[in-house]
Amino acid sequence: MSATAWTATASGARARGRHTWLGVFTAALGGLTAFAFCLHVGGGVTATLNMNSQPAAAIPLVVLPVRLTCAVLAAVSAAAGAAILRRQGGRGTYGLLTLGLVAFTLAFVIWAARGTEVSFEGLLASTLIDSIPLMFGALSGVMCERSGVINIAIEGQFLGGAFLGAMIGSLTGDLWLGMVAGAAGGAALGGLLAVLCLRYQADQIIVGIVIVTFATGVTSFLDLQVLTPNQATLNSPQVFGNIAVPVLDRIPLLGPILFDQNIFLYLALALLATIQVGLFHTRWGLRVRAVGEHPRAADTVGISVLFIRYRNVILGGAIGGLGGAALSIGSTGEFTSDMSAGLGFVALAAMIFGRWSPLWAATACLLFGFADSLQSNLAVLNVPIASPFLLMAPYIAVILAVAGLVGRVRPPGADGQPYRRE
């Protein structure tokens, strides 16, 4: 057998093994759903889902029998796992996996809401709100890594943007200036990353970790020494209010969630659409992807590799800074030390989970946002699960993602590789 044929056979065997594992995992979720959520619930117990935030309900309350609903969802998850095992590959595999995960999650939510009422609209709304900073961070990572520079520094860009956004927003009383300052702070850290990695060709992962450590230390020090003694004047900004889109905000269920949010959501969605279209449907995007995949070939046809990398890393830093501003002047109304709490690394995981695609990375951000929102809502419902385990939920989702739950992912060919013209 030739080396090429042997490699193809080995690759096929690995793919079949991965799909077998995914099928078993999905089917096991069905079994777990049946065991944990059906057998220990009385036949007359119901769960009530509230689909409206307004008193004048456009959608009536949904009352579900817990045992029957969870049994149906368990069957859906088990059937999805069986279908994966039967198919052993194909484009529908990950769709079936998603179906199984969604069925398991819905069963868990319904089981948690047994005997009470839960705001399903509120759960979805908090999912979207929790996802906004992650979307900015994931888009920052996509901008950098599609051009061939690893951006571990998203966490630091979050902190820089949150700090400057809160301070400038408080000092000037202008939230728009605070937003610009947050973007500028992220861009400055992006510029530092670019200079160290591109001009001096330092190890990109080490530089990113150093920038995160630097930003964490500086912002914590300045918070203690500058912001805290002057809380009223330097760390009490207003917060962007919601902007309702006429007519659309009245759509039942989705209207208040999608069309009655603050400017950061609309800005994140606009950036998502722009970067998605720009990367895959414009000459600019073709050049960026060429530099990230094969910089030597791009250089031979006259593309300035270093210019594109500098530009993308600085723009990516600015987007990361906007994510930080969303944490302070878009949500809490103040800066606190280490307020990003690892969200930059979660955004990095979302980018990997989304296979360096803006659209799929944003979808992964929604997944992680839902995990975070779910643990908050479960704590309110007094679910008999220890709170530390609930707090771990978003990070367990991250670990499963980066551990290869959806299979092997391939970064851009030249990601993390320094380039010097000969």
Image (cartoon, grey):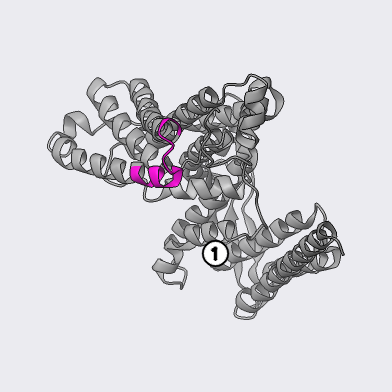
For residue 161: magenta? no
Q: Is residue 331 above or below residue 279?
A: below
Q: Position of residue 198 (x, y in %)?
A: 45, 32
- Which secondary structure type mostly characterizes the magenta part of the structure? helix
Q: Residue furthest left?
A: 229
Looking at the rendering, which quadrant does residue 7 occupy?
bottom right
Q: Which residues are magenta?
A: 198-210
Q: Is residue 252 visible?
A: no
Looking at the rendering, which quadrant does residue 207 occupy?
top left
Q: Position of residue 114 (x, y in %)?
A: 56, 68
Dot 1 crowding, Cα within 10 Å, few <14, some 14–19, many 20+: many
Residue 223 or 214: which is nearer the viewer?
214
Looking at the rendering, which quadrant does residue 86 occupy?
bottom right
Q: Residue furthest right?
A: 1
Kind of residue at badge 1: Ala
Position of 366 with respect to 23 (left or right) is left
Q: Residue at x 36, y 41 (%)?
A: 156
Q: Is residue 219 visible?
A: yes
Q: Residue furthest front?
A: 422
Q: Residue at x 40, y 30 (%)?
A: 195
Q: Is residue 74 above or below residue 40?
A: above
For residue 206: magenta? yes
Which quarter of the rendering shows the C terminus?
top right
Q: Which residue is mark 1?
A: 113
Q: Position of residue 240 (x, y in %)?
A: 39, 29
Looking at the rendered structure, the secondary structure element under dot 1 is: loop
Position of 180 with respect to 119 (left or right) is left
